[in-house]
Amino acid sequence: MPDLFRKPRFSAWAVILGLLVSWATAAVWTVDGIDTLVAALERLEFSNVRLDALGTVTLAPALQELAKLDEAAIWQVAQDRSGTLWLATGNSARVFRRTRTGAAPELIFDGKSGEVLALTTAADGTVYFGRTPEGTVYRIRPAAAPESLLATGSSYIFSLLTDRAGTLYCATGDQGRLITVTPDGRMRTVFTAHQSHLTTMHWLVPDKQLLVGTSPDGIVYLLDFAVNREQPEVSVFYDTPFEEVRAIVSEPGHRVYVAANSPAGSGGDSGLARVYALRSSPAPRHSSLLLWSWACPESLIFALALRPSYCLLVGTGHRGIIYELDTLGRASLLHRLSETQALFLGPSSPRPLKTPLFLATGNGAKLYQLGPGYADSGYLVSPPHDCNNPARFGSLAFRGTVPAGTRLEFDTRSGFSQRPDSTWTDWAEAPGKVLSPSGRFIQWRARFSSRFPDLTPSLTRTDLFYGAVNRPPQVKRLDLAELPLNEARRGLARPKRTITWETDDPDSDSVAFELYFKGDTETRWKLAARDLTESRYELDTRALADGWYSVRLVVSDRPDQPDGLALSTERTSRSFLIDNTPPQVVELNVRHLDDDRYRVSFTARDGTSPIVFGRVAINAGDWQPATPEDGLLDSPVEHFTIDVRLPLGESVVAVWVADAQGNVGVASTTVLR
């Protein structure tokens, strides 16, 4: 049988996030199964609810606390013919007795140290228990005090059983011996395994066929006493790949369940604990057929027990979880205890399917009775769901059944942290609609209740609808192209200014752009363009007067959002200069120096922009750069001088200047030599 917690066709208990594709479409968080519960158990809160293997949540069987002891553990529970319960405990090797009246358990035996791992009762009311590591078996006859019965010579006594004739069977370690004691006191070793420990025993056929689990090889032996009670026929019933066989139970028809454990770190891919479902086969040599196996999500299996309809209960550690397996090996979560170890699950009479089931724990020694009937109330709290962004919440729908006399109610709470804390809202009832305020995270709680022990509501699916709170778009960049200096020096003016921008919408909405401009001395923004869809615009500055300006970009998500919900963001550029007026050349003068040498001087004047270049040409010849008198081109007014040589006759001296916006001014004069 494959692993019971693999993903089925539909991802079970999966958290499914639907994307918010438009303002009118809500995302939905759907929960409908058990698949991911095991992985989420540390974050999942539930009490008194059963999480079914097929994805249905119901009330769990009622769990009634019968006793609480100041001990480390209750290892074994047995019930005698009068209905009195006997409790074997550790770490002080004590035995307690609890009568039917419900009185507090009475201390009957105090070993001061060690464990009482094994305890059983006989048909005549005699109680037997074994003390570890002393290796002694004690007996308590009706109305008598405890007395030492047998020193086994072994350190451990793991399991005790009796047959109908009153013979006691004692499974020991560390020598792997099975010892019997007859009612007249005769002791005999009837089986010695090639194992250190005989860890558990179970009658497959009462008085005839005994199953014995072992360690460290994890083998289950079958001992057949039908022919010779003193020398049984021994065969291997099943060899597990684990180290320890911890528990064995069987049902009519010879279906056998075996729980096996490995030490921490040695389980490999198969896990640390597993349950095997086997079919007893008389040939060859009383072997077995593997029907299926179940990999336990917990580190240890401590106990097995059968319930009506042959469901198998599995007690585990170290989270105190009780699992329930159906006949196909599908697992349900039945209970999670406050104690960390479910050490004992068991019937207390020879007819286990018709009697109460008892549960005993460790790391908090308590005795419970499981059932009959359902718990009267319970709850399941979902893991928090991350909506990724702040969201507003809508309806909460569920599928299930609510019989008359039962109730299934929901609450929700919301917050902005992954783990619920004091900043989250209080629980609010959700009568079909989520009333919790907006938040990034949301969580629901289902409350189950019933007025009748044989009725329970059920839950198979929840759908919580939400819509992301709209967030405004963002402007990451707004740039205006500047004329490069080398182009301005060449007089390559660009009256059309390119404006580019980069934006982002956190909700992936489509956006539209509007562009405005305003002079620095003006008070109102003027619309340059609207409903732009590209992140680029050419501003023709020839329609504007010279001066300093700014542009403002408005980006809006209105293409995907309705009126009243659309949001916008603005970004204003730095001021920039518009200058389309060419500079003037004034005070052009040519003065003779000597021979053919002349000095040309002139002034370049611009209304707004710095002068960036000046040059002179003689008779349309090559241009010669002129140098400003102060050595720097840093002002709208610059004075230039340059020495040139003129040929004989008439010459034309031309002057060319450019400002920082690439505007060009020219002038010329005639000189006669």
Image (cartoon, rainbow, N blue to C red):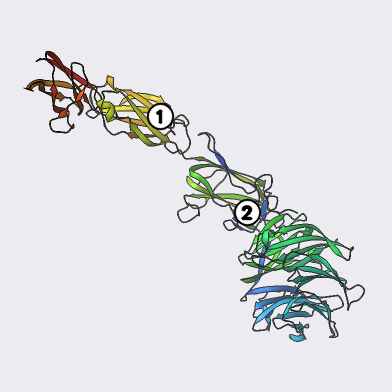
As drawn, the label of residue 428 is: none
Image quadrant containing the N terminus: bottom right
Q: Considering only order in the chain, which callout, 1 or 2, is on the residue closer to the N terminus?
A: 2
Say which of marks 2 and 1 sits in front.
Answer: 1
Taking the image as drawn, is residue 370 in sight? yes
Left or right of 84: which side holds 409? Answer: left
Q: Which residue is mark 2?
A: 37
Instruction: Pick the residue in front: 422 or 136.
Output: 136
Q: CA distance from mark 2 to mark 1?
A: 48 Å
Q: Residue at x 79, y 68 (%)?
A: 220
- The amino acid type found where label 2 is placed reads Leu
Answer above or below: position of 48 versus 114.
above
Q: Indicate the quadrant where residue 570 lies.
A: top left
- The amino acid type found where label 1 is placed reads Ser
Q: Which residue is mark 1?
A: 535
Q: Residue at x 81, y 67 (%)?
A: 351
Q: Indicate the quadrant where residue 285 lies.
A: bottom right
Answer above or below: position of 90 versus 536.
below
**Residue 209 placed where, x, y %?**
86, 70
**Residue 254 placed where, x, y %?**
84, 62
The residue carrying pointer 1 sits among few (fewer than 14), some (14 to 19) or many (20 or more) residues within 10 Å by Cα, namely few
Taking the image as drawn, is residue 354 in sight? no
Left or right of 288: which side holds 509? Answer: left
